[in-house]
Image: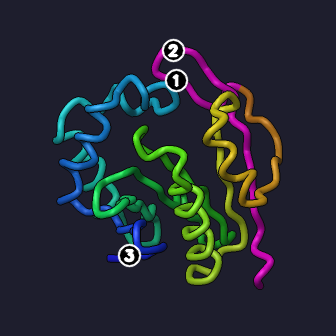
Amino acid sequence: MKTIQIDEHILLKEAELSDAPDLFHAIDSQRTYLREWLPFVDLTLEVADTEKYIRSIVTAPPESRDMTFIIRYEGIFAGLIGLKTIDRVNRKTEIGYWLSEKYQQKGIMTAAVKALVDFAFCELHLHRIQIKCGAGNIRSKKIPQRLHFQLEGIERDGELLSDGRFTDLETYSLLNDRE
């Protein structure tokens, strides 16, 4: 079980089944806020749905397993961040993330993404990381911009949102210059 202590307030901890109630409560208590950009919210109707999601991660074969971390701020569940679709042959991955509304604008997610980038480059020896953000999701896309990711382009209608409309995705990437 990997943990990354970012500072005295922020901890990243690999998700485990015991995190399901906290994760579900965060989704269930702020559905309106989260569903604007996160299509899975409407599919998460009970704790069992969250348990199924976490179980799918922790039981996946190690060579194809995503690394999903719970973000804890001062010991309290604040959000989720992870390395998705890790391609070890081509040494690349994608970072996905979301943060509860009450923890916005505290620098938590920027610090979490930076820590995960460092982990991916230094410990996993990956070469490329990408982040995809809804084109209208200003807060989300400020994070890769702040961390000097390069905008590569737009994936037109790249994600179907909960309200039935497609949104373009901005794709940002960062290459490992530490190699």
Quick check: 16 left or right of 163? left
Question: Which of pointers 2 and 3 lies earlier in the amino acid sequence?
Answer: 3
Which residue is at the front of the view, 20 or 156? 20
Residue at the spot of label 3: 3
Q: Is residue 9 positioned above or below 5 on the image?
A: above
Determine the CA span between mark 1 and mark 3. 31 Å
Per the rendering, the mark at residue 164 is 2
Boundaries of the magenta span = 157-179
Q: Is residue 41 positioned above or below 121 on the image?
A: above
Residue at the spot of label 1: 161
Q: Which element carries disc 2, helix, strand or loop?
A: loop
Which residue is at the front of the view, 103 or 137? 103
Q: Residue at x 34, y 58 (%)?
A: 57
Q: Is residue 110 magenta?
A: no
Indicate the quadrant where residue 32 lies.
Answer: top left
Q: Residue at x 73, y 39 (%)?
A: 170
Determine the CA span between mark 2 and mark 3. 37 Å
* Amino acid type, residue under disc 3 in the picture: Thr
Quick check: 78 left or right of 116? left
Q: Residues within 10 Å of mark 1 (few under 14, many from 20)?
A: some
Which label lies toward us, 1 or 3? 3
Determine the CA span between mark 1 and mark 2. 6 Å
Location of residue 78 in the rendering, given as x and y in whole percent from the top left corner: 37, 51
Q: Are marks 1 and 2 in contact (CB under 8 Å)?
A: yes
